Image (cartoon, rainbow, N blue to C red):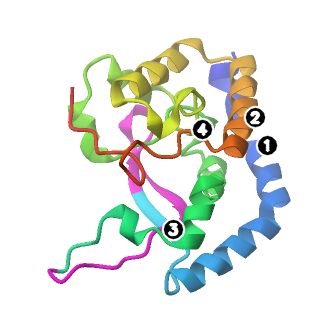
């Protein structure tokens, strides 16, 4: 009942309230990133959602577009701005995704939406992460985030799909707040974010 009906109502209500409460912070971060990224405070990218349907995700843009002499983008660590680093460490970069939740592309809680080029690389079990709407935060995020392996992350994602409940979502929300304050698992060792998934 919760999974098929009340979860969407819970998502919409919480996202609307969240946007209203966070609107002053939203405006401040937008202005700061507008200056740091030469007029580009937002980052848009195509991601697969429920049933692998593609949608356009929106986040705060934490990296600039600086390129090397050959015209290729510099490594993530070199493009991460000072304000972008702060926004990422405090997870403020996820706030614009509340708009995706309101639209119905995402949920507050669920497997994180990854890159569409990963779709052919999943095995049959890992593909089950797309049986539900992707989330701003999820079971994998409160159990290691980017500091765990891809295999562990997918195991947590599928576990969540099999155990969705209101109480689990509430637990994940509280654990997410805790993770934000202690700033755990933001990046993988030796990486500015998380290395690319290359398949099993």
Residue appearing at x 34%, y 24% in the figure? 151
Label 3–label 2 contact, CB within 8 A: no
Residue appearing at x 71%, y 30% in the figure? 175
In the structure shown, which secondary structural element does the residue marked by tag 2 occupy? helix
Q: Is residue 14 above or below residue 73?
A: above
User: Which marked residue is nearer to the observer: mark 4 or mark 1?
Assistant: 4
Magenta span? 46-70
Residue appearing at x 55%, y 67% in the figure? 84
Disc number for residue 137: 4
Label 1–label 2 contact, CB within 8 A: yes
Name which of mark 4 and mark 1 comes first in the sequence: 1
* Residue situated in front as seen by the camera: 156 or 133: 156
Task: For residue 109, say whether it is visible.
Answer: yes
Disc number for residue 10: 2
Quarter of the figure with the N terminus: top right
Total labels drawn: 4
Label 3–label 1 contact, CB within 8 A: no
- Spatial distance from mark 4 to mark 3, Cα to Cα? 18 Å
Name which of mark 3 and mark 1 comes first in the sequence: 1
Q: Name the residue under label 3.
A: 61
The residue positioned farthest toward the front in the image shown: 190
In the structure shown, which secondary structural element does the residue marked by tag 3 occupy? loop
Classed neighbour count for the residue bearing mark 4: other residues with Cα under 10 Å, few (<14), some (14–19), many (≥20): many
């Amino acid at each position: 009942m919760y999974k098929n009906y009340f979860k969407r109502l819970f998502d919409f209500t919480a996202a609307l309230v969240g946007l209203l409460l966070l609107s002053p912070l939203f405006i401040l971060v937008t202005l700061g990133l507008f200056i740091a990224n030469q007029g580009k405070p937002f980052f848009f990218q195509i991601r697969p959602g429920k049933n692998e349907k593609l949608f356009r995700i929106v986040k705060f843009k934490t990296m600039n577009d600086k390129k090397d002499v050959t015209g290729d983008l510099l490594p993530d660590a070199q493009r991460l701005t000072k304000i972008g680093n702060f926004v990422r460490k405090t997870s403020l970069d996820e706030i614009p995704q509340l708009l995706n939740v309101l639209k119905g592309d995402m949920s507050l809680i669920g497997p994180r939406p990854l890159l569409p080029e990963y779709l052919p690389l999943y095995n049959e079990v890992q593909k089950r992460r797309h049986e539900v709407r992707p989330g701003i935060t999820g079971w994998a995020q409160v159990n290691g985030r980017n500091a765990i392996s891809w295999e562990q992350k997918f195991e947590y994602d599928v576990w969540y799909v099999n155990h969705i409940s209101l109480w689990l979502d509430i637990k994940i929300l509280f654990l997410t707040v805790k993770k934000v304050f202690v700033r755990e698992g933001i990046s993988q060792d030796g990486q500015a974010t998380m290395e690319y998934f290359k398949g099993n």
